[in-house]
């Protein structure tokens, strides 16, 4: 087992079952799995016979076992790629909006999620994701305004996805046992996102600026990002005494749009 790759393998079949049920795999689905490991989820995904299935594993030493799983599959629509999922271009392999299923490696879980959200201005995109995170990271994703855990990732994900926690997973359900517990979240792409996807870069910019120093009131930051005219026309003075964590996602979306006009 390689610690550097976050190799803590799931050993509880009933959790596998819940993840697969939440994915609701249909025969015309296109599926991406990150980090098959010993294939506990992979096997069940194949069993559901999706139209297309790609799984990406960074650790080539797992190749022999994984090849056995794929041996019976003659379909060229099923592929194992041995590479870094962060470097993978989903649009090069999928034809339609796809689903992602993964017990994510801890060290790259947030970079991967951010990558998928940033890709929403391309086609195809992840329409549904069933992802296992470290519990603390899941709490940050789900966090609501006015809480310490609320931050850029809570905003970016909730502007584009409806997110629900389906299960907390105790660390005892993995081998080797990690130090922390996990949670599985289901992300469903919103039919009407809070902000048009073409503005995602501005949303990234504005959240980055305001959360840069989350304990400070945002007056100075707003004054450096926006002209006086934009501030007064849009009553942004009303936000001056607030901190980044007191601003709802909808207001971040408005600020992202104002950035364009600035
Ligand atoms: N799917 C298995 C399970 O549920 O038991 C294994 C999950 S394990 C938490 C994470 C897996 O992701 C490991 O097999 C690891 O080698 C792989 N991995 C780590 N970093 C990766 C990366 N950047 N790209 C692709 N796979 C990666």
Image (cartoon, rainbow, N blue to C red):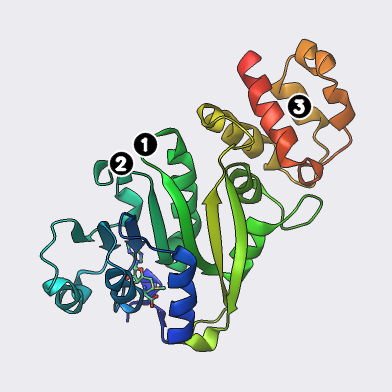
- SS at mark 2? helix
Q: CA separation, marks 2 and 1?
A: 6 Å
Determine which residue is flagged by label 2.
91
The reply to whether dot 2 and dot 1 touch (C-beta < 8 Å) is yes
Determine which residue is flagged by label 3.
222
- SS at mark 3? helix
- SS at mark 1? loop
Q: CA separation, marks 2 and 3?
A: 36 Å
**Which disc number belongs to residue 123?**
1
181 on left or right of 235: left
Residue 208, image x and y in percent?
62, 38
Q: Residue at x 68, y 49 (%)?
A: 151
Residue 10, image x and y in percent?
42, 81
The first of marks 2 and 3 along the sequence is 2
Q: Is residue 55 above or below residue 180?
A: above
Pick whichever, 123 or 138, lies toward us: 123
Q: Is residue 88 above or below residue 260?
A: below
Q: Is mark 1 within 8 Å of ligand 1?
A: no
Q: Nearer the viewer, mark 1 or mark 3?
A: 1
Q: CA separation, marks 1 and 3?
A: 33 Å
Q: Residue at x 56, y 29 (%)?
A: 196
- What residue occupies the far front of the structure in this picture? 27
Pick whichever, 157 or 262, lies toward us: 157
The first of marks 1 and 3 along the sequence is 1
Q: Nearer the viewer, mark 2 or mark 3?
A: 2
Q: Is residue 93 above or below residue 141?
A: above
110 on left or right of 34: right
């Amino acid at each position: 087992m390689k610690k550097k790759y976050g190799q803590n393998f799931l050993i509880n079949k009933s959790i596998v079952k819940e993840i697969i049920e939440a994915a609701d795999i249909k025969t015309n689905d296109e599926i991406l799995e990150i980090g098959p490991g010993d294939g506990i989820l992979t096997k069940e995904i194949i069993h559901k016979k999706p139209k297309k299935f790609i799984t990406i594993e960074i650790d080539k030493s797992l190749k022999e076992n994984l090849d056995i799983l794929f041996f019976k599959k003659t379909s060229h629509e099923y592929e194992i790629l041995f590479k870094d999922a962060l470097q993978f271009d989903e649009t090069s392999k999928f034809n339609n909006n796809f689903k992602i299923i993964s017990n994510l490696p801890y060290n790259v879980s947030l970079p991967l999620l951010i990558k998928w959200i940033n890709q929403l201005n391309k086609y195809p995109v992840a329409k549904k994701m069933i992802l296992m995170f470290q519990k603390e990271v899941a709490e940050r994703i789900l966090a609501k305004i006015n809480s310490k855990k609320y931050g850029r990732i809570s905003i970016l994900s909730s502007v584009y996805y409806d997110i629900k926690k389906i299960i907390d997973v105790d660390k005892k359900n993995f081998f080797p046992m990690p130090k922390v517990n996990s949670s599985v979240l289901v992300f469903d792409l919103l039919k009407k996102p809070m902000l048009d996807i073409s503005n995602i870069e501005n949303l990234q910019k504005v959240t980055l600026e305001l959360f840069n120093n989350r304990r400070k009131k945002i007056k100075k930051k707003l004054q450096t990002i926006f002209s006086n005219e934009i501030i007064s026309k849009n009553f942004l003075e009303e936000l001056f005494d607030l901190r980044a964590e007191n601003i709802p996602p909808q207001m971040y979306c408005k600020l992202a749009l104002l950035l364009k006009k600035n």
